[in-house]
Structure formats: structure tokens, C-alpha cells
Amino acid sequence: MEDRKESELKSFCSRNILIILGFSSIIAVIALIAVGLTQNKPLPENVKYGIVLDAGSSHTSLYIYKWPAEKENDTGVVHQIEECKLKGPGISRYAQRLNEIDAYLTECMERASQVIPKSQHQGTPVYLGATAGMRLLRMENEQLADKVLSVVTKSLNNYHFDFHGARIITGQEEGAYGWITINYLLGKFTQKLSWLNLKPNGGNSQGTYGALDLGGASTQITFVPQNERIESPSNALHFRLYGKDYSVYTHSFLCYGKDQALRQKLAKDIQGTNGILRDPCFHPGYEIVMNVSELYSGPCTKRFEMTLPFDEFQIQGTGNYQQCHESILELFNTSYCPYSHCSFNGIFLPPLHGDFGAFSAYYYVMEFLNFTSEETPTQEKMIDSMEKFCSQPWKELKTYFGDVKEKYLSEYCFSGAYILSLLLNGYHFTADSWKNIHFMGKVIWVLAGLWADWVTEAALGLKEVGVSLLSLAWCPVLPFTCNPS
């Protein structure tokens, strides 16, 4: 009897021990799995974000960037992760409707709030840089320009980001930003930063690229002259980048962006008409009615303003490239030059030197005209293509390019002719130097940290500029350069 009880006890204990061991094994396996999953779980990404609003003359775009936070001195590759184009014109057009600015900014700022993790909002800097559109408004009415910036500032301060200010940059700064951006990304300041494999056509691969920027209200040319003294002090910038000194020529032509140049041409050509302007820069069959008061609004057309016997006029396209080109040339005064070399309007321009990157509207227009898919075509080929394009009937063009907005489509003939006139007759590119122009896509300058102040001080020779991405968060929107997600 006792043996049986002892046997049952042993059996009971054995069963329980097995159950306990089995349960423990299951727990251990679960624990191991949990540890394994934890070990393999990616660590939180240690990155920083930045928001830039590029407030141009015709529109404003918001860009979101991120970069590794753990890099020494916050240096590292900046990735553009989002672009949001604000619905509406440039901010200068809101001068008479300030109450609409808040709504104008809302959609893209809300998008930024969704893209950037909420935990990062307070540490994310926001910058707004306004260019030629606001420079023109400030020329016309400084108080109104200040009001626009004040309302923009108030609106952006409502978001839980680290707002660093909204300001109007100078034409000289805009030229400097474009030049530094291109050369930084091409690795021209140091071999360690060779992001692109572009090589100049012959010549020294260490030489810097010039920068050609074309916007709606202004255009900039910036480059390092070869063994030439910069005769006009206002056109000179002096940088020390990575231990090397650079003497850079730059000039910004306000009112010579493609939109304001067109307004100038129309204001000039409407004189002496009966209210019907037969314009060779628009396609045959194209017609549109404009108000004279709208044409004369703003500083760029003031020199052509006169009393006319009509309040509105009609444009009728005739589509003739050569006549369009001749009309555009009248905008460039090359009759006098107080220096050894000039571009136009008496502005000093040293002899062109090296390769040039042409971006912004240069690229948009040339891409549409199919001049960017291979090496830069010859002048002759481009002129021949422009003659054929401008002579195409408007009705046929609309059918073929039905997805392009009519305003943009109608102006490509003028814009293409204007670009060729500006480069060939304004800046004096020749058959030899023409091949050194590379249409590179748009390059976005980004006002980050104290970069604007660094540029100013460097221009005055007050400090050496080491281009780090703490103070420089530039990113070109090129498929082979940037890393958009």
C-alpha cells in the first residue's frame, strides 16, 4: 500500500515537473523570440528636419529636408523628402489682400506637419526667403512689402516649428547662393564633395562653374573671371572656401526675368498701335485681351508708360522668331559702356570664363523645347528649332500639348527667344563659349541657420566660410544629384 502511494506521489511530482519544465521552455522560447525581435527592430532614425519656403515672383514652393543629426557639426548629405507648391501667385501679389495670406500658407504647412514627426516639430527650423517679386514691391511701396512679411511671419509663427524668419534677399545674395550651390554639389570646392560626375568641356576640372539663374522677375549671372580685375565694386564678392580664396563676379538684373521682360516688351510695342498688337512672339491664331493699367503696374514698365487712347488692347500672334528676337533686343541697351567690357544697360561684365550651369527657368523652358535631352545643341540648331516652333499655329499646338496650361504654353515662343537673346546678345556667349552652357535643372537655395549672415561677412572678407550643412542646406532637384524619396 505504501509502495503504491509512493509510486503515485512520484508520478504526480514527475508530471508536475514536466509541466513546469514545459511551461518554462515555452516562456524561454517566447523570451528568445521577443529578444530576437527587439534586437532586429530598427533603431529610431536620428535625423533632423528643415523647412524652406522659396517665395519667388510667380509662386512659392515649400521644401522639406532631412539630414543625419549624429554627423559631426551636423554635416552630412541633405535629402529633400517633400515639395509642396502653394496654390496661388507669389507672395508679392497678396499685398492688397493680406487677409488671404494665412489661407495661402495653410495647405503646405499642414502637409509639413504631417510629414515631419510630431516629436520633431519644435526642433525643426523654418525659413522663408523672398526674391525679386518682393524686391520690386519694396521698390514700389516699402511699407506694403513690410506688411506682407509681417503677416507671413505671424502666420508661420502659429505652427509649432522653430520659425527663423522671413526676409527679402538681395540680388547679390541670390547670385551668390546659386554659384555656391552648383559648385558645392559639383565638388569644386573640395574633391571629397564630388557628388556629380560632370566634367567641364576640356580645361581644368578644378575650375568652378559659373551660375546662370533665370526667374520671373530677375536674372543672375555669377562666375570667377580669369585674371580679370572686377572693375565695378558692387559686382564683386570675395569668398574663402575650404582654405582657398575666390574673387567672384555677380550681377542681378531686376526686371529682366522672363515674366517682367515680356511685360517690358509689350509695354514698348503697344506704343503707336490702335489697340491691336500683332506680336511675332506669340503663335499664329493666338489672341488675348489685356488691360493697359495692368501692363503698366509695377516698376519694370514705368519707363515705357504713356497716355494711350484705349484702356485695353488685343494681342494677335503672328509667330515669327526672327522678328520676335529683334523686338527683344530693343530691351538691351548696348549703346554705351563705362567699363572695358559690358553686358547691357552699362553694366560691367568681364569676359566669360569656364563652364556655366543654367537653371531655374532656363531649364524649364529648354526642357519643354527639347533642348536638354543631349549635349547643348548648337546655336544654329536651336534657332532653327525656335523658328519652326514659333510658326506653329496656336490651334495645333493646343491640341498637341493639351495637358499644358495655356498661359505657359502661349509664352514658350517668347521665353525661348528671350533666353537666346539674353545669352547671345546680353551676356555675349559666342559659338565657342556656347558649348560650355549646361542646362542643369532647377537649383534650390536654402536659407538655413546663419548662412545668409555668413555669406555677407564672407563677401566683406570678415571670415572664412567652411561650407557645412549646419549652415548650408542646399539641394538641387536633379534626378542624379538629390535623393528625394
Image (tube, helix red, strand yellow):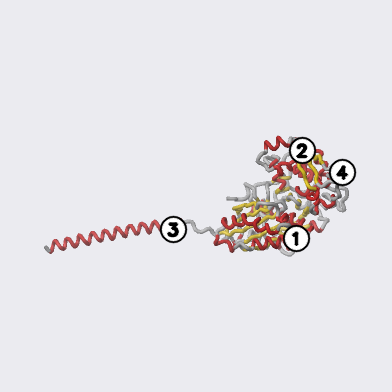
Chain-order first, disc 2 or disc 3? 3
* SS for dot 4: loop
Q: Which residue is disc 2 drawn over? A: 383
The picture quadrant where one finds residue 234 is: bottom right
* SS for dot 1: helix
Mark whose residue sits in front, 3 or 4:
4
Q: Which residue is disc 3 drawn over? A: 38
Mark whose residue sits in front, 3 or 1:
1
- Residue 191 seen by the camera: no
What amino acid is at disc 4? Gly
The picture quadrant where one finds residue 328 is: top right
Q: Are marks 4 and 2 in contact (CB under 8 Å)?
A: no
Q: Which residue is disc 4 drawn over? A: 272
What amino acid is at disc 3? Thr
Chain-order first, disc 4 or disc 2? 4
Q: Are marks 3 and 4 in contact (CB under 8 Å)?
A: no
Q: Residues within 10 Å of mark 4 (few under 14, many from 20)?
A: few
Picture residue at 44% right of the left edge, 58% below the top: 38
Q: Residues within 10 Å of mark 1 (few under 14, many from 20)?
A: some
Mark whose residue sits in front, 2 or 3:
2
Q: Are marks 1 and 2 in contact (CB under 8 Å)?
A: no
Residue 167: give x, y in percent of width and height: 71, 60
Q: Which residue is disc 1 drawn over? A: 144
Residue 22: give x, y in percent of width and height: 29, 58
Mark 2 and mark 3: Cα distance apart in space: 64 Å
Residue 441: give x, y in percent of width and height: 68, 47
Mark 3 and mark 1: Cα distance apart in space: 58 Å
What amino acid is at disc 1? Leu
Number of numbered discs: 4
